[in-house]
């Protein structure tokens, strides 16, 4: 039974929500940070953290699991070979969500989802 185990549905059907999260995660890995609504940032944060944890192991299976989310071999290799190397000695907390105020058009709470930089990297 799944009592009280909920995830953010973001007001979208399953396929739309998955595509949205996939795009957000891809942008975080490409650019290092993105600005989006707070709810979307928190939903994408858990996926990014999970993928970096996979990337730290770096095996074939983990690369395939990452590629299922990113659908881009070059980006998958970059995540495993470059991004994950920064977090080998850390066991979590690879990203942060920083609230930046409200969006002017509709008043939605905005936030920046960014990869945490290590000292000296």
Image (tube, rainbow, N blue to C red):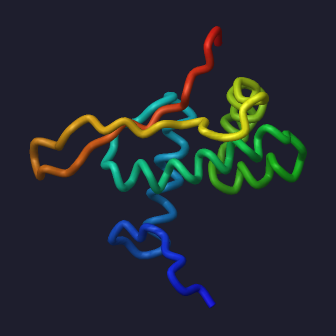
Give the vertical position of 6 relative to 34 (above or below).
below
Quadrant position of the N terminus in the picture: bottom right
Q: Position of residue 16 (x, y in %)?
A: 43, 67
Query: Closer to the camera, 9 or 22?
Result: 9
Q: Residue at x 64, y 8 (%)?
A: 120
Q: Position of residue 47 (x, y in %)?
A: 58, 52
Q: Position of residue 73 (x, y in %)?
A: 72, 41
Quadrant of residue 12 in the image?
Answer: bottom left
Q: Residue at x 66, y 43 (%)?
A: 72
From the viewer's perspective, is 121 left or right of 64? left
Q: Residue at x 78, y 29 (%)?
A: 88
Quadrant position of the C terminus in the picture: top right
From the viewer's perspective, is 79 left or right of 42? right
Query: Closer to the camera, 81 or 92?
Result: 92
Q: Residue at x 49, y 75 (%)?
A: 6
From the viewer's perspective, is 63 left or right of 13? right
Q: Position of residue 118 (x, y in %)?
A: 62, 19
Query: Closer to the camera, 79 or 107?
Result: 107
């Amino acid at each position: 039974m799944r009592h009280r185990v909920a995830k953010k549905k973001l007001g979208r059907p399953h396929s739309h929500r998955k595509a949205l999260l996939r795009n957000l995660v891809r942008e975080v890995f490409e650019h290092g940070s993105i600005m989006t609504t707070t709810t979307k940032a928190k939903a994408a944060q858990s996926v990014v953290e999970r993928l970096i944890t996979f990337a730290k192991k770096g095996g074939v299976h983990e690369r395939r699991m990452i590629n299922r989310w990113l659908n881009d071999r070059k980006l998958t290799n970059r995540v495993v070979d470059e991004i994950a190397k920064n977090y080998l000695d850390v066991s979590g907390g690879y990203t942060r969500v920083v609230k930046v105020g409200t969006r002017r058009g509709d008043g939605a709470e905005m936030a920046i989802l960014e990869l945490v930089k290590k000292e000296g990297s």
